[in-house]
Amino acid sequence: MKYKYNMLITIMLVLCNLSINRVHAQENDPLFIKNIYENILTESKCFGWLDEMCNTIGGRLSGSDGANDAVYFVKNKLESLNLDTVYTQALMVPVWERGDVEIVKNMTTNKKLNCTSLGNSVGTGAGGVTAEVIEVQSLDELRALGKDIVNGKIVFYNRPMDPMKLNPFSAYGGGVDQRVYGPSVASEYGAVGTIVRSMTVNLDDIPHTGVTVYADGVVPIPALAISTNDAEILSNDLSKGKVEIYLENYCQNKEKRESYNVIGEIRGTTYPEEIILVGGHLDSWDIGHGAHDDGAGCMHAIEVMHTFKNIQYKPKRTIRCVLFMNEENGLAGGKKYAEVSNAASEYHLAALESDSGGFTPQGFTCDGDTTHYKEFFSTLKSWEDLFSPYGLYIKKGGGGADISPLKSQKGLLIGFKPDPQRYFDYHHTSTDVIGAVNKRELELGAASITSLVYLIDKYGLRDDR
């Protein structure tokens, strides 16, 4: 009887101690997160790194010399942090060159329009292309016109991003099909060129580039974007009568080239086989410096590693920083990374991507395979109160393009979400430079991401960990 009594007391004391430890862990979390914020807001290097990359390298379109220089730039930064491992992962990427001349000219009014060629466009070559322009609001409207009307014309896609959508990313999703697929459909119906309204809700004079995709068997035709102000003017001119447009550009697609993902990691002490990935894409379009898209995301990811080393945090799980190549015009980096990871039978408990700019952080959205998604999301959601002092939410939603191929590993995919309202002022433009990035906003984003990675590492996402 006495033995049973002592055993009962022992069990109660153990349970009590476990409960106390669990309470203390929860009570210590706000202080630890506060320490992360204080460290990053006073000792971070992310803005300086971004400034240096933008101003010494500039645009980083995959396959370009700039992209190659960026690989070695970020590899050197990661190596300077004394991580456990830093390495590159080879992959083949497309090579597209813009050329030196880009002209869209209204021959009826003799006015040049602000323009930029779309990624993967072919060039007109010397002499350019002159043809009557027809305006449409959608791919379906073009198809309804039929080949008899479209043949030999320049198609002008002029559907604006919907300003009534409060989230500009939703507005972008509702309009970008005309840029991505519009030129290919126009070619199918006999068009000789394409003009696309820039993807922004702003009315300004800045043209936005971006990828266009030609379907197999379709003859590529020249495709250029014009600014929203010029789109409005051209539409008004067309309302008065026939308009002829002259196009000239010298784009060309070349043979694929070897490039690299850049990877650095701190190996976990307890569960090294469980990987927590944090990353962004290293490539950008060529006409700006890719400061927000996605230099900011890359520096967020490197700053996570810098901060953990700086505060001498030893993670239980492996923290891996991955800077992907070729998100903008192919996603080769994300696909290659997942291919190699799957072949090695790796397991990503969580993968977090920052690819929405360096603006004021607002929260995180989560996606994943249905196998564990409900449980994993519920765990993350339970920490939302810890982020409320910083104004951050945790919601269901998308993860990120580069990490999407990891969905088959059945971990949690997380997207970092800063304030989206200004993102499409700079997206894919010549104005996406370091001057568009606020140092404190960038640092707050890094602190937000680092704090979430800390919680995932400390507690895991599963009930049995």
Image: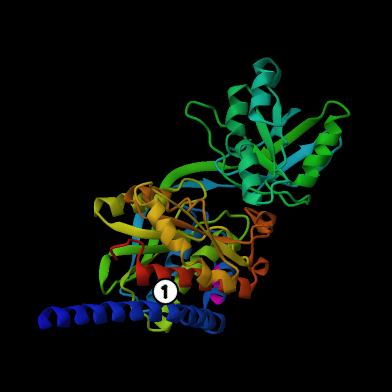
Residue that appears at 65% across and 27% down: 192
Between 110 and 411, the one lying in front of the other is: 411
The image quadrant where one finds the C terminus is bottom left
Q: Is residue 51 magenta?
A: yes
Q: In which quarter of the image is residue 315?
A: bottom left
Q: Is residue 381 left or right of residue 54?
A: left
Can residue 221 be seen here? The reply is: no
Q: In which quarter of the image is residue 82?
A: bottom left
Can residue 136 be seen here? The reply is: yes
**What secondary structure prevails in the magenta region?**
helix
Assess disc 1: are there few (<14), some (14-19) or many (≥20) residues with their C-alpha within 10 Å of its C-alpha.
many
Which range is magenta?
A: 48-53
Residue that appears at 71% across and 18% down: 149
Residue 228 percent coordinates (x, y): 76, 45
Residue 404 percent coordinates (x, y): 43, 49
Q: Does the magenta stretch include residue 460?
A: no
Give the vertical position of 411 relative to 50 (above or below): above
Q: Residue furthest right?
A: 240
Q: Mark 1 points at which residue?
A: 305
Q: Quadrant of residue 161?
A: top right
Residue that appears at 21% across and 77% down: 11
